[in-house]
Amino acid sequence: MPDIAEFSLKDMTEVSAALRSMGSGAASMEEAGDIIVHYLYDHLTDKEGGGNACALVRLFKTHSYGELDHELQAFASGILKTEPASPEMKCLCLLASAGTLPAWNTRKQSAGHKAIPLPSEHFVEAFPMIRQLIQQLGLDVNTVLHPDPAVVMDMAQTTYNVFLIPEAVGSNYVPVQDDFVIPFKVRSVLGFGGILPSGNLFAIIMFSKVKISRQTADMFRSLALSVKVAILPFVGKAVFS
């Protein structure tokens, strides 16, 4: 099992190959995502401290409000405090989760991240981690909120980047310090993802108990393509289980 502090090219190649096959046999994108996040949670280790390297691993995907079920629509509307102006409004939805606490192993028990509405660039400012994620992935916030079909195909083929907060403690981009970062010893936050042919963003976010360097983080860029290969068969088909 790879030590995340010493993640090597060999580790990257092996993990990448494993991730690519994780859509096979799954009945939905959520099911494939669940296999992916549990694999990363279980297989990335902290050899120095012992045990899992991550406190929490999650897969997110943007989704139009009008395509969500009633439960997720109600969750998003509750954050907005109103109904959205358009059913096309994007929401950043939690698709799969794996972590230290039992409640972190299902998206349905998430208290605050089931479906985060993204009605405008201004609204995204209230979620600094989401804004940083989008920007560090090399995307414009407005492009994620309003994908242009004319440029989506190019983005879907070329946009694979990483998101890194090297020091989670005290970071303004990781707001839940006292209830999450400090008690669960989160030291760095690493994300990787890209754009699907539908124009929707997908991203894996890992909350690591091991400090991650930029050099290590850059090696995860290749894993974004592997995750995309695994979930691509479900684009336009069964997303949620």
Image (cartoon, rainbow, N blue to C red):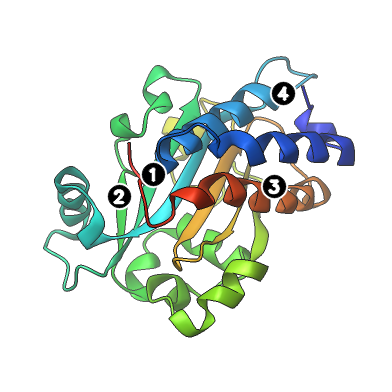
Tell me the mark number nearer the camera, choosing from 3 and 2.
Answer: 3
Q: To which residue does mark 4 refer?
A: 45
Q: To which residue does mark 3 refer?
A: 223
Towards the viewer: 47 or 15: 15
Q: CA distance from mark 1 to mark 2?
A: 6 Å
Q: CA distance from mark 4 to mark 3?
A: 17 Å
For mark 3, give the secondary structure: helix
Q: Residues within 10 Å of mark 1 (few under 14, many from 20)?
A: many
For mark 1, give the secondary structure: strand
Contact (CB < 8 A) between labels 4 and 1? no
Task: Tell which circle, 3 or 2, labels the residue nearer the N-terminal end.
Answer: 2
For mark 2, give the secondary structure: strand
Q: CA distance from mark 3 to mark 2?
A: 24 Å
Report the amino acid beneath label 3.
Answer: Leu
Checking the image for residue 94, the label placed there is 1
Contact (CB < 8 A) between labels 4 and 3? no
Towards the viewer: 133 or 224: 224
Task: Tell which circle, 1 or 2, labels the residue nearer the N-terminal end.
Answer: 1
